[in-house]
Amino acid sequence: MTINWFPGHMNKARRELAVALARIDVVIEILDARLPQSSRNPMLAELRGDTPSIPLLNKSDLADPKVTAQWLESFSADEATRALSISATDPADAKRIPGLCKTLAPHRRGPGKTVRCMVVGIPNVGKSTLINTILGRRIAEVADRPAVTKHQKQFELDRGVSVSDTPGVLWPKLADQTGAYRLAASGAIRETAFEVQDVALFAARFLAQRYPAPLAARYKLETVPSEGQEILDALGRKRGFLKRGGIVDTERAAEILLRELRSGAIGRISFETPADFPSDLPEDLASDLPSNLPSDQEPAPD
Ligand SMILES: Nc1nc2c(ncn2[C@@H]2O[C@H](COP(=O)(O)OP(=O)(O)OP(=O)(O)O)[C@@H](O)[C@H]2O)c(=O)[nH]1
Ligand SMILES: [Mg+2]
């Protein structure tokens, strides 16, 4: 299946983001706490150069707290800058960020100076939410498109700290199939780009392996089958999603599983742990993946 949600001219987007970042003192890099590695675009490190950044593991309210603690530890080993886990929807979390930005750009502090920040991350990761929660209102021009250099304004986040009104949208890495499936399961990829059932089968198998108890509790399953299809069948039967002839409506079961996984209804789930890298998921789970998710992540020529 070909990619059709991918922003059109990636080279142009990359150039525009690089230009925008050149005028920024601190990059606020938003990652998804449920999949911090798969939601990270390594291109950002290249684009931001020496500009300091704060990696924020957002949506931590949806992630497994034990796994998030492991991620924070692994980030602190790699990064000069400390990563933080937050919920961008929580003002107490969001309002800590401007102060952190100030500490990362001491040369931009003082009378008449401003620490200029920019929020960057893949689609749906919570960029607009963070800006709006810090400001306590919706600001103009928080748009779902790559950073535009023209008309870019700065809004005051706090005394001496400003944020660009247009968040920088990074494209998710889709070259690694397992990562692509995790991204799709988390809601980072528009549903027109993949088969809902394929992703639900991946999610079902993953939950059976890593989170069997919450899965069983949510769908009142006496035993948790290991096969994705059997899990969707059991879920469909429990919820009464039946078609004529008593056949399970797998499509509906797939949609419900993904919806409830994303909303946190199944529990606080993390899709990956630091131990999954670099070797990634165990072979048996990875080998089961259909290979029809888009695999291209490199910017196409203009
Ligand atoms: N549970 C939870 N949901 C969040 C959090 N932060 C953002 N969201 C939700 O995630 C969805 C996407 O948030 P946005 O702020 O629009 O994400 P974005 O990065 O601006 O997305 P694009 O503009 O598409 O690139 C919304 O439904 C938010 O309510 C969080 O910390 N916890
Ligand atoms: Mg947005």
Image: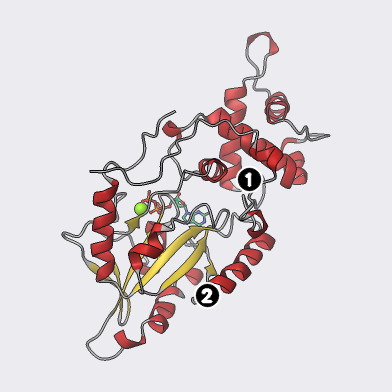
Residues packed near mark 1 inside 10 Å, few (<14), some (14 to 19) or many (20 plus): some
Q: What residue type is labelled 1?
A: Ala
Residue 248, numbered label: none
Q: Is residue 132 visible?
A: no
For the residue labelled by badge 2, is the local secondary structure a helix, a strand or a loop?
A: loop
Q: Taking 72 as reference, is 244 above or below it? A: above
Residues packed near mark 2 inside 10 Å, few (<14), some (14 to 19) or many (20 plus): some
Residue situated in front as seen by the camera: 160 or 186? 186
> How far from the left and from the top, in percent, is residue 285?
68, 39
The residue located at (61%, 55%) in the rendering is: 278
- The answer to whether 150 appears left or right of 91 in the picture is left
The residue located at (70%, 24%) in the rendering is: 233
Q: Going from the N terminus, do you reach mark 1 or mark 2 first?
A: 2
Q: Taking 138 as reference, is 25 above or below it? A: below
Q: Which amino acid does label 2 sit on?
A: Arg
Q: Residue furthest right?
A: 222
Q: Name the quadrant containing residue 97.
A: bottom left
Label 1 – label 2 distance at C-alpha: 30 Å
Residue 82, numbered label: 2
Q: Mark 1 points at which residue?
A: 265
Looking at the figure, which quarter contains the N terminus? Answer: top left
> How far from the left and from the top, in percent, is residue 229?
68, 26
Q: Is residue 202 visible?
A: yes
- The answer to whether 6 appears left or right of 148 in the picture is right
| Disc 2 residue: CB within 8 Å of ligand 1 | no
